[in-house]
Amino acid sequence: MDTSEALRDFLISRRARLRPRDVGLPEHGVRRVRGLRREEIATLAAISVEHYIRLERGQASRVSDAVLDAVADALRLSTGERQYLRSLARPTGRTGSAGGTGVRPSVRHLLGSMTDTPAYLVGRGGAILAWNRLAVTIFADFAAIPAEHRTVGRLVFTDSHARRLYVDWEAKAREAVSYLRTETGKRPHDPELAREIGHLTESSADFRRLWSQQHVLETTHATVLLHCPPHGRLEFFWEALQLTGEPDEVVLVYTAAPGSPSAAALRAMSRAPEVGSVPR
């Protein structure tokens, strides 16, 4: 990924979503551009217009942290967006395999011990590296999917099962795109990640639409509703648990409220004979 181009597109998109009234500025006449002008952002950030223009052109190498923070304040960036801005302005150049170097046996044991809790391990670029039995029951027969296709992005955007599984598929798709954009900010020169983004861009109009909106990851926990025949609509809470010593890997764990129909359904699924695959 060209970080200069990505920085430019991100700043323009964040500037375009603001209106003068959002930042306490008067609105005079008809505006020829959507959102705030460069001059207005520069004024709000207390920097020169030339300084901001250089930043929006992707020339961030000489920009101080204080200026980045001031621009983030002016653009009303969220915590996730601030982190993404910093990643683009200070690219680390990290590369490497999207699937990592292997899963520790202790992590596989941890997943297997969660008998009433669906869980799976996600590595860099959204690669799904390991899982437990309930994750297979609910989400996919991961072992049957070739490793190069076994990614969060492809399962959401190129597998029709996801559209039936997620009650609010659009929210899940936006979450997946946000995660991948945040990943590109961390590793802008990762060739496997670039190939993944390229594949999704070519194969999914929905991905192209959401990718253009510049969403970045804002949360590591949420509530999700899933269609799980024959149990019906189930509500789960998911948490992304960071593995100590593995900064690029997280365990996605899904739980249900104690005593809820969703918790009862999880217990029933955990005790059912293993079938090896979810209904497609």
Image (cartoon, rainbow, N blue to C red):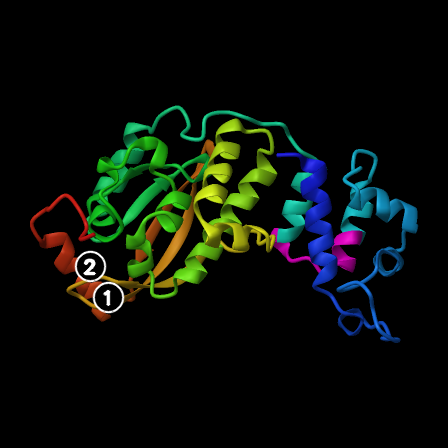
Badge 1 marks a residue whose secondary structure is: helix
The residue depicted at 29 percent of the width and 66 percent of the height is 257
Spot occupied by residue 125 in the image (x, y as percentages of width and height): 46, 37
Based on the displayed image, in which of its 4 quarters is residue 261 positioned? bottom left
The N terminus lies in quadrant: top right
Badge 2 marks a residue whose secondary structure is: helix
Magenta segment range? 71-80
Q: Main secondary structure of the magenta part?
A: helix
Kindly identify which residue carries mark 2: 266
- The mark found on residue 215 in the picture is none
Crowdedness near tag 1: few (<14), some (14–19) or many (≥20) residues, C-alpha within 10 Å: many
* Residue situated furthest left in the rendering: 273
| Foreground of the two, 29 or 105 | 29
The answer to whether the residue labelled 1 contacts the one labelled 2, judged by CB atoms less than 8 Å apart, is: yes
The residue depicted at 67 percent of the width and 42 percent of the height is 6
Based on the displayed image, in which of its 4 quarters is residue 59 positioned? top right
Kindly identify which residue carries mark 1: 262
Crowdedness near tag 2: few (<14), some (14–19) or many (≥20) residues, C-alpha within 10 Å: many
| Foreground of the two, 129 or 109 | 129
Q: Is residue 111 left or right of residue 34?
A: left
Spot occupied by residue 54 in the image (x, y as percentages of width and height): 84, 42
Spot occupied by residue 270 in the image (x, y as percentages of width and height): 15, 53
| Residue 134 visible to the viewer | yes
Q: Label 2 amino acid?
A: Leu
Residue 79 is a magenta residue:
yes
The residue depicted at 89 percent of the width and 59 percent of the height is 43
Whole-angstrom CA distance, mark 1 to mark 2, is 6 Å
| Foreground of the two, 23 or 280 | 280
Spot occupied by residue 171 in the image (x, y as percentages of width and height): 45, 61
Residue 201 is a magenta residue:
no
Q: Label 1 amino acid?
A: Ser
